[in-house]
Amino acid sequence: MTAERHEFQAEVKQLLDLMVHSLYSDKDVFLRELISNASDALDKRRFQRLTGALPSDEGDLAIELVPDATARTLTIRDSGIGMSRGEVVKNIGTIAKSGTKEFLAAAKAKATEGSPELIGQFGVGFYSAFMVADRIELVTRKAGEETATRWMSTGDGAYEIETAERDQPGTTITLHLKPTDEEHGLNDFTSAGVITEVVKRYSDFVAYPVKLGEKTLNSMKAIWDRPKSEVTDEEYKEFYKHLAHDWTDPLRTIPVKMEGTIEAYALLYLPGRAPFDLFSPEMKRGVQLYVKRVFVMDECKELMPSYLRFVKGVVDAHDLSLNVSREILQKDRQIAVIKKQLVKKVMATLDEMKRDAREEYLGFWSNFGGALKEGFLEPGGDQEKLLDLLVAATTHESTTTTLGEYVSRMKEGQDTIYVLTGGNASTVRRSPLLEGFTAKGFEVLLFSDPIDEIWLDRELTFQGKAIKSIGRGNVQPGTEEERKAAEEQHKDMSELMVCLRAAIQDDVKEVRLSSRLTSSPACLVADAHDMTPRMQKLLEQLGQAPEKARPILELNPSHPLLPKLKAVFAADSLDPRLAASARLLLGQAHLADSGTLPDPATFATALDEVLLRALA
Ligand code: ADP
């Protein structure tokens, strides 16, 4: 049978192009990537044997490296699960990772600037072999199938695929090596010395023998059940890279040992950067489950809450059955206890980082804060602990703060943590709603992530203090008495308010005076239990049609406009200037709130009317 020629998916072509011309200095890592893939495939095969899904008498589980200096090839052979023809096309011909396009565009730009390190961030797996090889041949046979598949490519945009033979299930990858060029990181990968060194450095802990001839190169010691004192930082880091297919160092390594009623070991990692697809539902979640060193499953959701889905690692639970299914895991009490412990450990690590390494913590927060905030919405999440980890922008200087620090700065008698949400960091910082609070010396926390609208809506408390948005209800700066006194004082304006409201009654719930403002004439607030205008917009963007909640228009009694309006009203309560002013003030308040007008035409007409009068 002749070989079929297939074009690679466009993204793969670009990626290959990057690899073939790669300036990435650490080219040795290709071997780590291929050994990791082989080790994953062996995990799957071993698991299927142990659970009876495959016969158990089919030879050793191992990875063999076969260099050939004359032919200038390096062959990596594993007796893992193998791939069917369809799987080869899917796994080696396409990339499913979301965010790939964006990544490739960025990587290309960086590479032309001479900074090729971005590819390391993406964790390019199999394709990294094209950094060292100009032709790759892969022969694979899936366990349980009779025929094998051969795949060949020179990395130039297409590959060939045909039916082949292989004695046993598994995968053989033959790399036709580029000429050695040590200056550019291209070592001689047919040299036993080079291979041994690279395997020891990157893949020592792989659970299967990595063999070169008769010799096994790796120690095969599982890293997670060794005492912390016996494992070097370097080893922990390499294990992370192997596990996460990430080429950058982890931010923190968290070994966990549980003894007593439940026996389990875990090794967790906080990655150094957010994956490109952190907010995509297809993101590969982080924790693998082992039972007494036998791999059981990937992406074990039951061990880590969704808001910590970026945590990578392995959990080895000694008392579970190998046959455990996802359904069983969901109900398993042991798993629930382990999960709780793991979350506690991660939280403690974050807490310590926040306290002792603030800069690093801020970096962590900018990567993963968005995911952590989802924890506020998750039932059973430890809200108080999560709030303690929160970092937010604040009106107190132009920096960021934690809630603990906010509370320590609260004014005498202040019982509320004030917050404000907005469409983006700069509009929220300039919101007129802040004026009264800052003038009176109250600090306000500023939020501009879409998710902030949602969790802040829940009115959580922190250290017994209510967290309230100053953009809704009657949250006004100052004490209860001050508010009462102001209301009294504003009584004589109430008829004017009714008159202004009449002009815009379809668009607002109420027009009232405010003590939030000092220099702006108007602002919008949501009624205590209504959605904020931005929340409505967010739901609309999500394809929902929330019932329109009309906002409240608040006016600033100390603004010079107010006495003028009052005088016009006193002279003639039907003066058309009153209605035009109401529309303009409403438009202005919308602009300050979101930067957009819900009804630009009406605003423009009112503006014309007022301009004409002013110029008359
Ligand atoms: P990643 O390992 O990050 O998923 P790769 O491009 O390295 O990405 O590999 C893509 C997929 O191809 C793997 O997820 C796996 O399903 C399959 N694969 C790669 N190498 C092997 C192998 N040696 N044996 C079986 N399957 C493999």
Image (cartoon, rainbow, N blue to C red):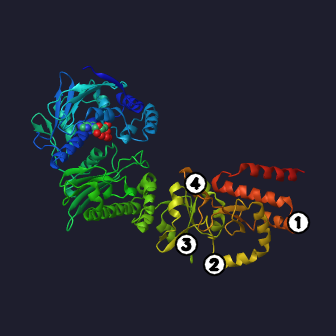
- Please rate how many residues cluster around mark 4, counting C-alpha atoms within 10 Å: few if below 14, some from 14 to 19, many from 20: few
Judged left or right of residue 530, residue 251 is left
Please report contact status of discs 3 and 2: CB closer than 8 Å, yes or no: no
Dot 4 falls on a residue whose secondary structure is: loop
Q: CB of residue at label 3: within 8 Å of ligand 1? A: no
Judged left or right of residue 379, residue 262 is left
Above or below, 490 relative to 244: below
Q: Earlier in the sequence, mark 1 or mark 2?
A: 2
At label 3, which amino acid type do we have? Answer: Thr
Q: Which residue is mark 4?
A: 545
- Please rate how many residues cluster around mark 1, counting C-alpha atoms within 10 Å: few if below 14, some from 14 to 19, many from 20: few
Point out the frontmost of discs 4 and 2: 4
Point out the frontmost of discs 4 and 1: 4
Q: Earlier in the sequence, mark 4 or mark 1?
A: 4
Q: Position of residue 11 (x, y in %)?
A: 41, 33
Q: In the image, what residue occupies the spot 33% across and 35% down?
A: 90
Is residue 422 among what the camera can see? no
Q: Position of residue 188 (x, y in %)?
A: 23, 28
Q: Earlier in the sequence, mark 4 or mark 3?
A: 3
Q: CA distance from mark 1 to mark 2?
A: 35 Å
Q: CA distance from mark 4 to mark 2?
A: 37 Å
Q: Earlier in the sequence, mark 4 or mark 2?
A: 2
In this view, the residue in front, 179 or 221, is: 221
Q: Which residue is mark 2?
A: 480
Dot 3 falls on a residue whose secondary structure is: strand
Q: Which residue is mark 3?
A: 416
Q: CA distance from mark 4 to mark 1?
A: 41 Å
Q: Which residue is mark 1?
A: 572
